[in-house]
Image (cartoon, helix red, strand yellow):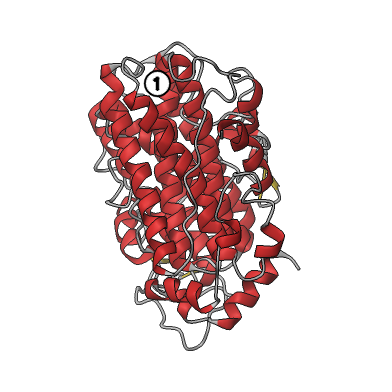
Amino acid sequence: MNYAGVIAGAGLLIASCKKDDVQPTAEDDTINLGFNDTGLLNYAYLLQQLEAAFYIQVMKTPFSGMTTTEAGILSQIRDHEIVHREILKNYLGKDGIPPALENDWSSIDFNLKSSVMAKAKFFEEVSVAGLNGICRLLIAEEHLVTLAKMSVVDARHSAIINDMITPGTFAEKADSNGMEVSQDPQSSIDITKRFFKKNITGINLPKY
Amino acid sequence: MKLTDILKEIESIQPETFENATGRRDILKNLGMKVAAIATPFAAVSLFSNKAAAKTTDILAEAIVFALNISYMQSALYAKAIAQTGLIPAAALEDFKKIQVDKSQHIAYWVYQLTATGNAVPAIPSYDFTAKNALPKAMTDYGTFLTVAQAIEDAGVRMYLTAVQMLLTNKAFRTDAVNIATTNARHAAFVRMQRRNQGIDMMPWVVGTEPNSLVGEIKKAYQNEDNTIQLKINTVGINGFAISFDAATGAFDEPMSEANAKIFMTPFID
C-alpha cells in the first residue's frame, strides 16, 4: 500500500512511496496525490473538495437575483458535494491529501449569475469526466462502485445546471455511442489544479 | 464461489487482454462465451433464471446482456411515446428524441460487441408500459408517461451501476458502462425536471425511496435507494455538517440487484 504524500518545504516526502518511482519535480508545497487506488481516491477527493468549496461559496454569497428555486437546487447540490468530500476524507484518513485546500477563485465573479453558472457547468463536467476516468483505473471493487455511484449524481447535477443555462443541453456531452466522454487523470488534473493555490501533481497515479 | 472470486479467476486466465479495447472482444471469444442460454430475455424462461449455469464463464457477456435489456426497454419506451401523437408536448419533443437517440446508440454499441465476439444477441421483447393496465394512461397522459419514464430512467441508472460491478475485470467495458450510466443519469434528471415543471415536488436526483411520488409496481425502482452508509461510513450529519437524510441519500445512486431488476422490469414486458 502506498500513500499520498505532501512535499513539505524541505522537499521531504512524507509517507512512503516505491523507491523506483519518479519523484515529483516540484520543490516546495506541492501536493502529491499518491499511488494506486489511494492516489486515485485522492484525486476524486480533490475534485469533490473543489465542487464543495465552490457551492459553499455560491450559497454564502448568492449571485444577484438568485431565485428560491435556484437556491433550493444549488444548496442541495452543495450538500451532496459535502457528503462526497467528507466520505472520501474519512475513508482516506491519514492517507488523504490535506482537507480544505485553499482555492483560487480569481476567474469567478460570485455576484454574477452567468459567471457562477458557467463555472458550475464546468466543474460538474470536469468532475463527471474525471470520476469516470478514475473508474477505469481503480482496482478494488468497493472503490469502483462508490465512485460510480458518486459520478451518476454529479451527472444529474451537470444535467440540471446545463438546462438552467441552456434548455435542451442536459446530455450534450454524450458522444456518438451515447456515452459520457471520460477523461484520464493526467489531463484532468491539469484542468482541476488551476483552481487551487498550491501546486498539485498526479505524477504517480496509474495511467491509462 | 463468490462473484469477485470468479472475476479474479477469469482475470488470471487472460490478464493482458483485459487491459485494452481489442482485448475486450478477444476475451469473450477466448473464454468460449455463449449467451445462447440466456439470450431470450424474459420470454417464459428468463435471463435471470439461467444465471447460475451461466455464471462461471459467461459473466462478461451476461453483464452486457443485462445492460442491454434495460437499454432495450428505455429505447422502446421513448420510441412508442414519440410515435404517440399528442403525448409529448411540442416543447419537449426534441429533448425526448435526443434521449431516444442516445438509448439506441447504447443498444447498437452492445449489439456490436456481442456480435463481434460471436455471442448471441438477445431478442427485443414486446413491451406493455401500462404494466398490465396498472397504469392505463401510461401512453396517453403526459404526467403518467413521465412517472413511468422517471422510474425506468432511475432504475436504468441503478442497473448500469450493477453492470459496472459485473464488468469489473474488463477496464474497457466497465468504463463504457460507467459512461452510459452517467448519460442515463442526465436523462433521468431531465425527466424528473419535466415532472417538477408539472408541479410535482421533485428534484433531479433520487431522494430516499421517493415515497410520495410513486405508486404500486414502479415503487420497486427505488428499493434500497435510502441507503445512508457509504464505504461503511454514515453520511447523515457526517463530520458535523448539516447533512439531512434527503441530502445523504440524494448524494449517491445505489446499484440494483439482478433479482430486483427482474422484479421491476417484468410487469412492463408482455
Give the image location of residue A96, x and y in percent.
Answer: 56, 60
Residue B27 falls left or right of residue A89:
left
Q: Is residue A10 visible to us here?
A: no
Q: Quadrant of residue A15?
A: bottom right
Residue situated in front as seen by the camera: B153 or A184: B153
Residue kind at label 1, given as amino acid type: Gln
Give the image location of residue B85, x and y in percent.
Answer: 31, 18
Residue situated in front as seen by the camera: B52 or B125: B125
Give the image location of residue B3, x and y in percent.
Answer: 68, 64
Q: Quick one: label 1, few (<14), some, or many (20+) residues within 10 Å?
A: many
Identity of the residue drawn at 44% across and 62% down: B114
Q: Quadrant of residue B99?
A: top left
Identity of the residue drawn at 37% across and 60% down: B112
- Above or below, B113 relative to B203: below
Q: Secondary structure at mark 1?
A: helix
Viewport quadrant of the C terminus of chain A: bottom left
Residue situated in front as seen by the camera: B143 or B223: B143
Find disc 1 in the rendering and name its residue.
Answer: B194
- Above or below, A37 relative to A150: below
- Above or below, B249 relative to B233: above
Q: Is residue A100 visible to us here?
A: yes
Viewport quadrant of the N terminus of chain A: bottom right
Identity of the residue drawn at 28% across and 24% down: B93
Total numbered labels placed on residues in the image: 1
Residue B208 falls left or right of residue B61:
right
- Outermost residue on the front side: it is B44
